[in-house]
Amino acid sequence: MKARINRSMNSLKTLDLVTKKVFLIGILLLLGIFSCKNKNEDATDLNQSEEPSEETTLGTKNSISKILSSPKSDELFLSDSVKKFYEKKEYLPTWSNNKLREGFIETLKNAEAEGLYFKDYHGNEIEAIEGSLNSQNNNEKSRYDILLTDAFFKFSSHLLNGKTNPQKIHEIFDLPKNRANLSVLLNNALAKNDLEIAFNELRPNNPVYSQLIVSLKEYKEKLKDSVEFKEIDGGEMIKPGMQDARLQKIKFRLMVLGYLKDIDPFTNDYSQPVQDAIKQIQLENGLLSDGIVGNSTIKLLNIDYKARYNQVLANLERWRWYPRDLGEHYILVNIANYHLEVIKDNKIISSHKIMVGTDLRKTPIFSDEIEYIVFNPNWTIPPTIKNKDVIPGVRKDSSYLKRKNIDIYSSNGELLNPNEVDWNSNKVRSYTYRQKPGSSNPLGKVKIIYPNKHLIYLHDTPSKSLFARNSRAQSSGCIRVENVMELVEYLLSDQSDYNSGKINEILEKGKLKQVQMDQRVTVHHLYWTAWIENGKPRFTEDIYNYDEKIIEELNKVSKP
């Protein structure tokens, strides 16, 4: 009896365990069902909260690959770059994101604001296809995707290095091209859905460029007023207090340009308000602000809005050529404006008037780093001056070399006697001609050397009165600097051994002395004729006629 009771109790325990297990399994199943349901409900809610993707599939891998391997790829501007780009991404479409694509097209349409034009980037075709995109077949969409990529590469290359070749325009343009991996920039921009990331890296980051974009817009709006410009005749200088029939046109011009108002233009008198306006326009355009109306001022007044518009266009183009990073410490030479600035950490340390090369011996455009300074320098006469000036001078006058304090050296460095040289032989062209320090030495008391193949450097001059002139294209290519000793003292300011007292002592001795630079300073020889100063457009004379050549080249590429 006792044994049966024990068996019955064990059976009840076993049943109880089974029941518990079944109950637990049921609970777990129910939890799983509710859990799955909640997950599904959450997923549905997430999907509903997401914005629907706005994409238009532009072609397929196969059709893009076929087009790029067909003769049609020859229609592209940069077919090699485009092919490599698609090859790396396995020929997948690039421009399916509607918002991104439409934003890019809008950027191209607005490119005129910086002197670039939509139609130069398949613009007409892109606009036509975009307007009928829904009716395009698969192959047509694939081709459209390729055209957009090609447009991106061409537009980007123009932002990076300009549309024209500066070496076709300048006699010597020796700046390296700006470099960027356009494929990497495009992929990064696509990944972030923001093409401006790429364009901002490619555009010039110099504030002058941004200012010129604003100025271009202003002059475009003024173009309609160009008809109001009537030619003013040149002639005798007009001085304050004089009467001249040309003053009526001059007054009208000053009124149109915004320099003069509330005055009767129908008189021939040169009154004080007119003088003040003339002085202001002279000052803002790099002329001597003396109020005297000479031919330089007449030439300035005859420049109409169309010419100014083109001048701004030319300068936008040249800033796309120039280096993106000028450094932290540098000397910036504006050849056209006869001006030099020392800049450190984006601050102007000092400014100097300069003289530059004549039209026949233009100062080249290039950059290099200063290595040393020479006090009481000899002047090794460059080949151009040697062949065009010195040798013909000696042939006409045997005392020429003695008067100029010039020594002659053979190719092996031997000092030669001028009286024993056959000046009619071509051998004289192979000799080195060196002018010793002295009052007639055109280098003055100091030269600042950054060795370069163009044999160009900064230096002093004994002809200091020339700095007072408006036009200072007076040299043989090198840069003459006003108050050059102030510049030299600054460049050596980090070397306590060369304070102003020590420098004066070196100069008084009159012996050649070379001092190596410690601090690193680069000299940039650039050329630009338009910028913004104190919120107003500033222009200077295009002394080498480069602007006109740039506009000619731009018009060959495209016409606005």
Image: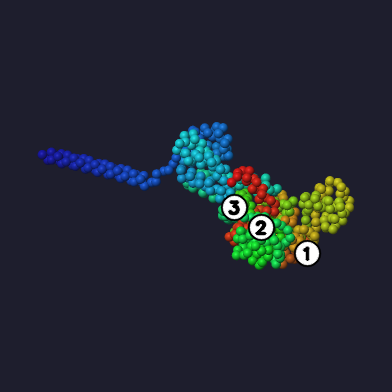
- Kindly report which numbered mark, 2 or 1, lies closer to the viewer in this rendering: 2
Inspect the image, locate mark 1, and give the three-letter code of the amino acid beneath it: Lys
At x 67%, y 45%, the residue is 168
Above-or-below relation of 383 to 65? below
Lower sequence index among marks 3 and 2: 3
Q: Pick the residue in front: 206 or 533.
A: 533
Taking the spot 62% from the left edge, 55% from the top edge, the residue there is 228
Q: Amino acid at mark 2?
A: Leu
Q: Which secondary structure lies at badge 3? A: helix
Q: Which residue is mark 1?
A: 509
User: How far separated are the C-alphas under marks 1 and 3?
Assistant: 61 Å
> In the image shown, does 274 or 64 lie closer to the viewer?
274
Tag 3: amino acid: Leu
Q: In the rendering, at what x and y percent does residue 557 appear? A: 61, 43
Disc 1 versus disc 3: nearer the observer? 3
**Quadrant of the image for the N terminus?**
top left
Q: Which residue is mark 3?
A: 223
Residue marked by disc 2: 301
Which of these two is toward me, 247 or 150?
A: 247
**Could one spot residue 315 in this view of the protein?**
no
Q: Is residue 170 above or below residue 78?
A: below
Q: Residue furthest left?
A: 1
Q: Which mark is residue 153?
A: none
Which comes before the other along the chain, label 1 or label 3?
3
> Residue 147: where, in percent of width, then height?
53, 39
First in sequence: mark 2 or mark 1?
2
